[in-house]
Image: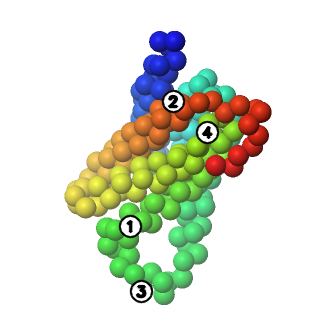
Amino acid sequence: MVEERNRPAKALLYWIGGTLIGWSLAGGLLLLVQVLFPAFSGPALFIVLLLPGVAQWLLLRRLLGIGPFWIATAPLATIAFVGILISVPVTLWETVDSEASATLAGIYAILGALLGLLQWLALRRQLRAAWVWVAASIVGIAAGFALALFTDLVNRSGLGTYVAVVLIYAATTGLALAWLMSQPARTPSAGFIAA
């Protein structure tokens, strides 16, 4: 009984720890690749993006039985995000203030939506109201970038921006995970609900 009550709190702490470890390893490895092998920085990004997924999946497979698809969600979301950005016509970028903080935070909200949607595919069968995960991913990434943009941190420190975004994303999605874990479990007799 006590263990069940502590489960969401443990999930929150483990999630934040795992996410911070994964993104710290990814950031450090990417910086190392940029210094030692600058020509491989672009392709290395997609490989390095597997690290946070591995760290998160190691936790989620024990908590919820999530499959290894989770590991690929960050690289897949990034590929889709880049595809969306390069498909936007130049004339559209000229009509909006593409340097405005709100515009940039909104653009990164798209990344959060893509990441959240891919991860929702893995969570929806184990957790009721898994759609909350999509909202938490959007808010986490957009709020992190908004903080960095509105405080001008992005112009003072790339590392500071990275840390701010990762911390806010980890906290937001961690709170969502804890809340989702506190909800009644999905039962097989309830049938499939896409929400």
Q: Could you classify mark 2 by the number of other residues whose Cα lies within 10 Å: few (under 14), some (14-19), or many (20 or more)?
A: some
**Which of label 1 and label 4 is nearer to you?**
4
Q: Which of marks 1 and 4 is nearer the N terminus?
A: 1
Residue in view at x 70 percent, y 46 percent:
193
Q: Disc 4 marks which residue?
A: 128
- Judged left or right of residue 78, residue 172 is left
**Who comes first in sequence, dot 4 or dot 3?**
3
**Residue 54, image quadrant:** top right
Q: Where is residue 111 in the image (x, y as percent from the top left)?
A: 51, 58
Question: Can residue 70 be seen here?
Answer: no
Q: Name the residue under label 2.
A: 182
Q: Which of marks 2 and 4 is nearer the N terminus?
A: 4
Q: What residue type is labelled 1?
A: Leu
Q: Which of marks 3 and 2 is nearer the N terminus?
A: 3
Choose between 41 and 27: the one closer to the eye.
27
Q: Distance between the residues labelled 2 and 4?
A: 10 Å
- For label 2, the SS is helix
The numbered dot on residue 104 is 1
C-alpha gap between disc 4 and disc 3: 41 Å
Q: Can you give x and y, in whole percent of width and height, for residue 67 in the image?
A: 69, 34
Residue where numbered disc 3 is placed: 95
